[in-house]
Image: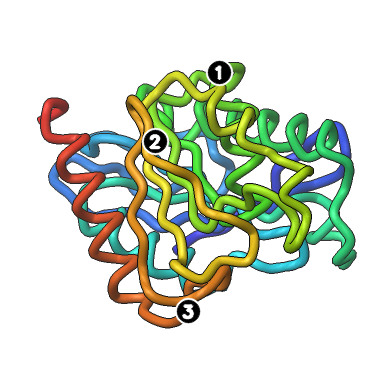
């Protein structure tokens, strides 16, 4: 594991890097200047609105990805790095995320396809920025379709707007709603609620299954 502090238009973000070992892979550079070779893709994961990258579903996803030959960057948004729990406005979240993605794509993840992902608010950011950031797939953990008890504030257009393969892992009792499968979008329902803490091993299996199947054409 290695860490980077990355400048963004809204303050520094942090990236906790987890690399899968493999033949031909170069060691990580703390400067972010040296690329990694020999792997199939890189996954950027964002946290929930008031949460952290230590959330159980993000940890399980990191394990699944590295075991599947995918490097992972757990991204802490600038407002969390600054010690605030209240999230920044959506525009600022998206701009900071894209700055981090560009930094990593030009550095340690050079020449690797990028998968965007995250839990809850982080999943929304991944969806909104997928096109601008050139993501080849999106992984959503506990996508919040609407605030609890407010189905009128529907956010499905963010998810529907993604035109690359999508995996959604959702709790069966999620008070934030439940997306439906669609063309290019797979939905895996697991026991539990929005936290996805009931069975982290099931999260890991679902992510590993999707990544290995999606990445198989890449060799």
142 above or below 173?
Answer: above
Which label's residue is closer to the chain start, 1 or 3? 1
Residue 71: percent from left, percent from top = 36, 47
What residue do we see at 49% from left, 55% from top?
Answer: 141
81 above or below 39?
Answer: below
Picture quarter with the N terminus: bottom left
> 60 left or right of 174?
left
Which label's residue is closer to the chain start, 2 or 1? 1
Picture quarter with the C terminus: top left
Query: Where is residue 166, by image quadrant?
Result: top left
Residue closest to the far bottom: 198
Residue 102: percent from left, percent from top = 60, 26
Dot in front, 1 or 3: 3
Which label's residue is closer to the chain start, 3 or 2? 2
82 above or below 163?
Answer: below
Q: Determine which residue is flagged by label 3.
A: 197
10 above or below 120?
Answer: above
Mark 1: few, some, or many residues within 10 Å (few <14, many ≥20)?
some
Q: Determine which residue is flagged by label 1.
A: 131
What residue do we see at 31% from left, 35% from top?
Answer: 41
Q: Determine which residue is flagged by label 2.
A: 166
Real-space CA distance between mark 2 and mark 1, rounded to the nearest whole angstrom: 13 Å
What residue do we see at 43% from left, 82% from top?
Answer: 198
What residue do we see at 58% from left, 37% from top?
Answer: 126
Badge 3 element: loop
């Amino acid at each position: 594991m290695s860490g980077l502090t990355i400048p963004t238009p809204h303050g520094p973000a942090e990236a906790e890097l987890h690399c899968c070992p493999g033949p031909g892979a170069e060691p990580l550079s703390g400067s972010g200047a040296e690329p990694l070779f020999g792997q199939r893709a890189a996954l950027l994961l964002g946290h929930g609105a008031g949460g952290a990258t230590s959330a159980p579903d993000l940890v399980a996803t990191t394990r699944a990805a590295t075991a599947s030959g995918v490097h992972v960057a757990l991204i802490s948004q600038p407002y969390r790095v600054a010690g605030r729990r209240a999230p920044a406005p959506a525009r600022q979240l998206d701009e900071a995320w894209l700055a981090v993605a560009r930094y990593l794509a030009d550095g340690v993840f050079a020449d690797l396809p990028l998968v965007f992902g995250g839990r809850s608010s982080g999943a929304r950011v991944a969806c909104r920025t997928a096109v601008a950031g050139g993501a080849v797939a999106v992984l959503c953990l506990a996508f919040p379709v609407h605030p609890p008890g407010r189905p009128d504030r529907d956010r499905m257009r963010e998810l529907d707007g993604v035109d690359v393969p999508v995996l959604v892992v959702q709790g069966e009792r999620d008070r934030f709603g439940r997306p439906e499968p669609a063309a290019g979008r797979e939905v895996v329902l697991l026991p539990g609620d929005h936290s996805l803490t009931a069975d982290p091993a099931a999260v890991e299996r679902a992510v590993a299954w999707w990544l290995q199947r999606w990445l198989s054409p890449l060799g």
